Amino acid sequence: MSADSVKLLGYWASPFALRVKWTLKLKEIEYQYVEEDLANKSPLLLQYNPVHKKIPVLVHDGKPVAESLIILEYIEETWKQNPILPEDPYERAQARFWAKFVDEKCVPSIMSAFTKKGEEKEKVAKEARENLKILESGLGGKQFFGGESIGFADIAAGWIGLWTRIVEEIAEVNLIDTETMPLLNAWFGRVLEFPILKECLPPQDILLEHIRGFHKILTAASS
């Protein structure tokens, strides 16, 4: 399979595009990467994702698949090597549950803590910590959500360890409490230091400045 048959439309600072990069790398799938300018979306992106007009989009043999978790499932079903979902149906359901929990609970509360101010910020930060503590319970004492190896839920959630630390620094808020959630904190370290995943991460200093600029725009709009 040539890289021409698989194309990823993404954005360097998007954790959702990162999920797809991680999966393609773990499965050793060659692909062509297309960097999008989100302020000036390409005709290609608008053609392949006319509904949401967002990245990431995976294009396989000319057919587009949108939304990061759906893309991960598509990749898993299409390329059988190096599976990211377990064979056991219950364990597969659990992996999907935690991935969905990340997107529906963790990400919104972390984003709220990033943009809110004063007492409201403290309130949503508390909610974010509670959600992250619940996420920690999904590890169940394992090295990874996938057991002894990186799996679907690890890919879905692992980026939070980097992005949330940056949110903490910029918004001056505590989200990942190393004392009350030591297992989750250690797991973030294992995921982000895993060689195949680490090489896909954007430079932390450049990402920090990018998110800082994003924070200024969001807080200015809300003030």
Image (cartoon, rainbow, N blue to C red):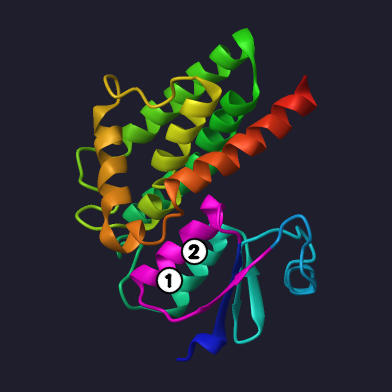
| Residue that label 2 marks | 20
Tag 1: amino acid: Leu
Q: Position of residue 27 (x, y in %)?
A: 36, 73
Tag 2: amino acid: Val
Q: Position of residue 132 (x, y in %)?
A: 41, 30
- Does the image show residue 15? yes
Q: Quadrant of residue 56?
A: bottom right
Residue at horizontal 77 percent and vertical 69 percent from the top: 42
Residue at horizontal 44 percent and vertical 20 percent from the top: 174
Real-space Cα separation, disc 1 to disc 2, in angstroms: 6 Å
- Compared with residue 192, is residue 5 higher up or lower down, i.e. above or below? below
Instruction: State the residue in front, 99 or 204.
Output: 204
- Compared with residue 160, is residue 72 higher up or lower down, i.e. above or below? below
Query: Which range is magenta?
Result: 11-36
Q: Please give left or right for residue 85 compared with residue 141 in the image.
A: right
Check the image and name the residue furthest to the bottom.
1
Residue at horizontal 44 percent and vertical 24 percent from the top: 175
Instruction: State the residue in front, 181 or 90.
Output: 181
| Residue that label 1 marks | 24
Q: Quadrant of the C terminus?
A: top right
Mark 2, secondary structure of its residue:
helix
Residue at horizontal 26 percent and vertical 19 percent from the top: 179
